[in-house]
Amino acid sequence: MASENPSVQAVVLVGGKGTRLRPLTLSAPKPMLPTAGVPFLTHLLSRIKAAGIEDVVLGTSFQAPVFSEYYGDGSKLGLKLRYVTEPEPLGTGGGIRNVLDELTADTILVFNGDVLGGTDVREVLDAHHASGADVTLHLVPVSDPRAFGCVPTDENGRVTAFLEKTQDPPTDQINAGTYVFRRSIIEEIPAGRAVSVEREVFPKLLQEGRHIHGHVDHAYWRDMGTPEDFVRGSADLVRGIAPSPALGDRRGESLVHDGAGVAPGAVLIGGTVVGRGAEIGPRARLDGAVIFDGAVVEAGAVVERSIVGFGARIGPRALIRDTVIGDGADVGARCELLRGARVWPGVQVPDNGIRFSTDV
């Protein structure tokens, strides 16, 4: 299999439990949740492939077999995929060190499997090689960096510090979760224990005077860890705001997958995605909704900025807003679920069972 970048391997860390997205992640790891109708991880793998990198190692932990069962050897995506499972959670640094035996290239590109991004992978690699750095970090400016670890750089792009969440950050640049390592640096990470790259590996390298470079761009970037971000990221993919080779040229206010049924009079806007085999009833209104395969939204129901899990049912004239509905749950007619509500898998909410307004 020919490759444009045979001297580069990619590592994707997909070991997290996705606790902030529960109950959806009770049945599937976060990177495997449908995002614009395909597993979230597929968008990242397609970007790696588009950059000419075909040798990819997945660092797994939570529900590890799900990944290999779905992707196999990676040939359907034009990739060579291998899997390394952490016996226990090892953190970002430990997870990278844990896959060392599968790494043969001198340049290792590492991705956090939680991030939806649009940066040009080749530009990050070019910046790494041009600077001669030991490690290169992808950095993005954000409007409020206080919730993130911020990474100041000097006039040459060299990283000068790693600052954990602070109320008065000196820069708006944050760590975007993509790294380029010399393989020899990965060899130095302690083996067999939990290690954080942000808190331990990178500060130690700086202290030793090693060269850590920052590549800053303004490409699309979103951490998909919360339901709100997951919904917005999916909608951005559908509308073409977030780029993904996995979706080709399809873009618009909604994306309805094969085998789904949408009744006359239903309104689908705001980057709504309707999964395979799902059914949307007449006069239903879906705005920024993520409807998983096999789910049913009955007549006159409204689903806004919410996720409806596999095989779940939303009853007639129900209102679902900023809510997560677990797989197989059944929400009765005229229920109102708002502002961060979460319904666990298989739970049945009777007609009028939960209301915010007084009329019935």
Image (cartoon, grey):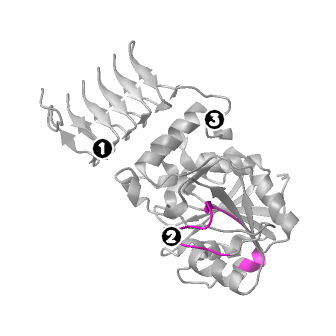
Identified at 42% across, 34% down, the residue is: 289
Q: Where residue 245 appears, x then y in whole percent?
A: 68, 39
Residue sitting nearer the eye, 173 or 321: 173
Task: Quickly name the residue at label 3.
Answer: 247
Disc on res. 339: 1
Residue sitting nearer the eye, 67 or 351: 351
- Amino acid type at mark 1: Arg
The quadrant in which residue 298 appears is top left
Q: Secondary structure at mark 2?
A: loop
Q: Is residue 126 left or right of residue 359?
A: right
* Label whose residue precedes the other's in the sequence (3 or 1): 3
Tell me the mark number nearer the camera, choosing from 2 and 1.
2
Mark 2, Cα crowd under 10 Å, few <14 / some 14-19 / many 20+, is few
Tell me the mark number nearer the camera, choosing from 2 and 3.
2
Disc on res. 166: 2
Identified at 57% across, 26% down, the residue is: 252
Q: Is residue 72 visible?
A: yes
- Amino acid type at mark 3: Leu
159, above or below 57, in the image? below
